[in-house]
Amino acid sequence: MDATSPKLAAPSAETIDRLVAVVGEKYAVRDAQEMENYVTEWRDRWPGRASLVLRPGSTQEVSEILKIANETQTGVVPQSGNTGAVGGQVPSPSGNEIVVSLERMNKILRVEALDNTIAVEAGCILQSVQEAAEEVDRLFPLRIGSQGSCQIGGNLGTNAGGIATLAYGNARDLALGLEVVMADGRIWNGMNRLRKNNTGYDLRDIFIGSEGTLGIITGAVLKLYPNPRDRAVALVGISAPEPALELLALAQGKTGNGVVGFEIFPHYGMEIVERHTELRNPLGSYFPWYVIVEIAGGAAPGDLMPVLTSILEEAFEADLISDAALASSEAQYQMFWSMRERMSEVQKFEGGSIKLDTSVPVSQVPELIERGLEALKEAVPDARPLPYGHIGDGNIHFNISQPEGADTDAFMARWDELTGIINNIAIDMSGSISAEHGIGQSKTYMMPKVKSPLEMELLLGLKDLFDPNGILNPGKVLPS
Ligand code: FAD
Ligand code: MLT
Ligand code: ZN
């Protein structure tokens, strides 16, 4: 059977009662109004409906739910923190699917400082995992703007990136093992703690990034790192993306692997952060672009300030940068990063905004930005582009805010056209249309364009093998 073909019907009243009995009435949401937070997402795109929301408290309950769903051919949408950016975590408008939220499964199971591992339930909020690591003087290095609400299951489901990918990799690089409930309810215990384990194909890596379409992740063993003894961060004013890359190379050359974060945003980003938050530009004046650079390591607090200072002095003398402010306190450190991390949030106050997640080889980011800006100028001359983000990873969120005073609905109706313009440039440059957010429901139609027929055949075959009835997150990732 073609795994994407079944159009699943709504569960019967009897099936709903059986599903509710698994978690108990207290942890089921049947009322449409009470389901609101689970069927809509933070940007109010892709509004969905569900027949039921279930909040299981254990792997066993997730297993019972999937057994019933598989037997009755009921679509299941796995959900963690509901911060996903591509609509993968919300059900379709049909109202036929159920949402399974992992939010109650939020226990830290075991921290092994000597192994540098932490085992957690999948509903743990990312920030809680960071804090648990900190308690044993270790670092869990996944860092994203949504870390106060996104959960490990969603981070692994999307293979999340973020602002420390440059040094530590994506979520996939940070996972050693997983526990996953399969579509038919069987439980795969892959909570591996080994650093090295080459026993055949790696199932873990197939589930990571599969966006809830191959199984529900219920637990994970994650890697911890030694806590850097010092860190230094600067906000830098710069004329263009090219010198930003030269600054990155300079900083990496002077610190080994010490650059943990390197992010860029244009003046429009600074403008809207200042307009919509209490944060203020710490530099003496305004510049076309800004970079936030963080280095970490050293042997003791205070070690890195002189290192970063000398890097910036050298960059200044070489005409790579125009100005820089170093964070001299924890409050300033948080303030600099807030400017960057709130970029997504403040864009909402500027009216309709179209979101992109493109990547190209790091050295080609300036070309991507230049070509993208030119093409957008032609398509919507008054649009306000905001190409920003993880330049150190070659990953730019080429977001586009509507022209001031324009009709929001009319602008948002151009989503596919405008994302198409940027994505086609990225494809032309051998880049990716999804660097870190995933495919969800927003980019499924692009899959045959970015995957070869051979890849599509293998992906559909995998889906069919793992989920023959197509109950897991129907309509997501693979086109139906
Ligand atoms: P959800 O949104 O609930 O789910 C995301 C996907 O994973 C869905 O397809 C869902 O079905 C699937 N899923 C959820 N739980 C499970 C599970 N237990 N098992 C299997 N599949 C599951 N993303 C980045 O990568 N980098 C960033 O820098 C970044 N910054 C952000 C900043 C802000 C302010 C916001 C709001 C979002 C940002 N995101 C970023 C997007 C988002 O936070 C990430 O994609 C995150 O990993 C999603 O986690 P979540 O718990 O919210 O998952
Ligand atoms: C970010 O890096 O800020 C996010 O991934 C971008 C987003 O939410 O659009
Ligand atoms: Zn990002």
Image (spheres, rainbow, N blue to C red):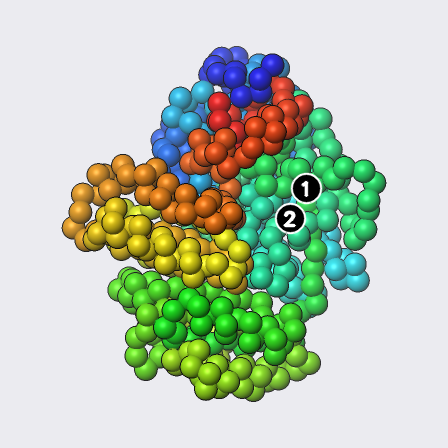
Residue at position x 18%, y 43% in the image: 407
Residue 357, percent across and down? 45, 49
Q: Residue furthest front?
A: 428
- Is residue 434 among what the camera can see? yes
The answer to the question of whether label 1 and label 2 lie on touching residues, with beta carbons closer than 8 A, is yes
Q: Indicate which disc residue 13 carries.
A: none
Near-viewer residue (350 or 420): 420
Residue 31, percent across and down? 40, 27
**Which picture quadrant has residue 278?**
bottom left
Q: Indicate which disc residue 172 carries.
A: 2
Q: Residues within 10 Å of mark 2 (few under 14, many from 20)?
A: many
Q: Residues within 10 Å of mark 1 (few under 14, many from 20)?
A: some
Residue at position x 37%, y 41% in the image: 420
**Which picture quadrant has residue 224?**
bottom right
Near-viewer residue (409 or 66): 409
SS at circle 1: helix
Which of the two labelled residues, at mark 1 and mark 2, occupies the earlier sequence position?
Answer: 2
Q: Is residue 54 above or below residue 227?
A: above
Residue 23, percent across and down? 58, 29
Q: Is residue 416 above or below residue 281?
A: above
Residue 24, percent across and down? 56, 27
Return the residue at label 1: 205
Near-viewer residue (228 or 11): 228
